[in-house]
Amino acid sequence: MMTPVTIVGAGLGGLILARVLHVHGIPATIYEAEPSAAARTQGGQLDIHEDDGQRALAAAGLTEEFRAIIHQGGDALRVLGPDGTVLLDDPVPLDDPVPLDDPVLLDDPGDGGSSGRPEVLRGDLRRILLDSLPDDAIQWGRKVSAVQPLGDGRHELTFADSSTVTSSLLVGADGTWSKIRPLLSDATPQYVGTTFIETYLHDADERHAATAKAVGGGAMYALTPGKGIVAHREAGDILHTYVELNRSAEWVAGIDFTDAAAAISRVAAEFDGWAPALAALITDGETAPVPRMIYTLPDGHRWDRVPGVTLLGDAAHLMPPSGDGANLAMFDGAELGKAIAAQPHDVEAALAGYEEAMFGRNVSFAADAREILDLCLGDRAPFGLIAFLTGS
């Protein structure tokens, strides 16, 4: 019988791995710290790329299920100036920038369906993956507190409730602060100096009409050097916003995010003078603002082969958000699952091959992610991003 696979983390990468293994008849158990699949919202919209995310879903046998959850038109895109001037729209640059109050353009955001990177809600994607696994594939409420090597590729996992399990093949799919990573690497995530602050508007077209027009049918970027507002229209008439700020960790720590009104006021002050329809994405938020400090692992992060254990996704190659993270995590999971299935009697060779391929492909993605963050918030913002998007 094939050695069972122990996966820590029920994110997209861990779920894809479990699904691909299941397709090939290889048993796997996921241990997840969250108490249930419904314990929290799963973040916003993802664009699923042809070269990695869609290939991973195909390897998992879930292409049709994926097509059923696509948010049509969600890949439309526009860039605005702080005063609301439209600088780029869907995604052809405009010869004559149009003010935000022009009703002709903004009433017709376009179908945005031509990019080949369809948008889906992360929660919907996670749901189809969960539904594709056996009922006993995931053990919820199992937070790993320690991992101990036992030799011969075996590891003992200790959970927060003091229970333990022993693995013969262990995969860390447990994200930024991975408990499995220290078995392989002494690298630790470092704050890059940028924080995203997450807010939501609901019933946007009816209750926040001017802001809904500003955002349009897909993604909206309003950027200047060091700060910006990025919003996305999601299914269900929701506007999901990330307020992006280049600020020190001390600045972030100085805001009491448990006091929602005070936190909103402090963040909104950074955008004094911006168009009211844009500022409303902060001030009219209907959920408490949540700070997301951006951490990365070193570019080119890699490790020597350690028997019986490997990593995928952010646990292996954490980088600034660029649209690639979820796609890469899923692709990692699919590639690892296929490698194990192809060499079930030489798992170490499978892991070595998987890791070498992963190390190679992620070098360019990490560099791209840093470049995109600079295009959004660096000295060239927003015109560097516009040039990147239009190939000019």
Image (cartoon, rainbow, N blue to C red):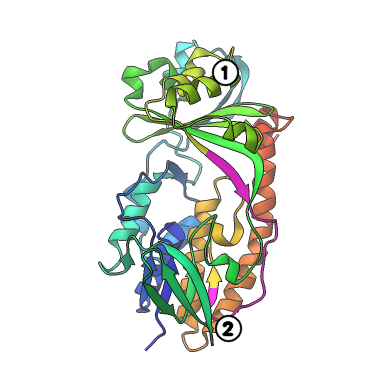
Residue at screen point 33% across, 29% down: 237
Q: Which stretch appears magenta? A: 292-309
Q: Is residue 378 above or below residue 345?
A: above
- Per the model, the C-alpha gap separating discs 2 and 1 is 55 Å
State the quadrant of the C terminus: top right
- Is residue 51 visible in this depiction of the protein? no
Question: Which is closer to the viewer, label 2 or label 1?
Answer: 1
Q: Is residue 252 above or below residue 49?
A: above
Instruction: Inspect the magenta stretch and tell me whether residue 300 lies in it.
Output: yes
Residue for badge 2: 349
Q: Is residue 188 above or below residue 391?
A: below
Q: Is residue 314 above or below residue 295?
A: below
Residue at screen point 42% across, 60% down: 57
User: For the residue marked with disc 2, what is the amino acid?
Assistant: Ala
- Is residue 166 visible in this depiction of the protein? yes
Residue for badge 1: 269
Q: Residue furthest front?
A: 162
Seen from the viewer's position, the closer of residues 178 and 72 is 178
Seen from the viewer's position, the closer of residues 7 and 390 is 7
Please tell me how crowded label 1 is: few (under 14), some (14-19), or many (20+) other residues with Cα within 10 Å: few
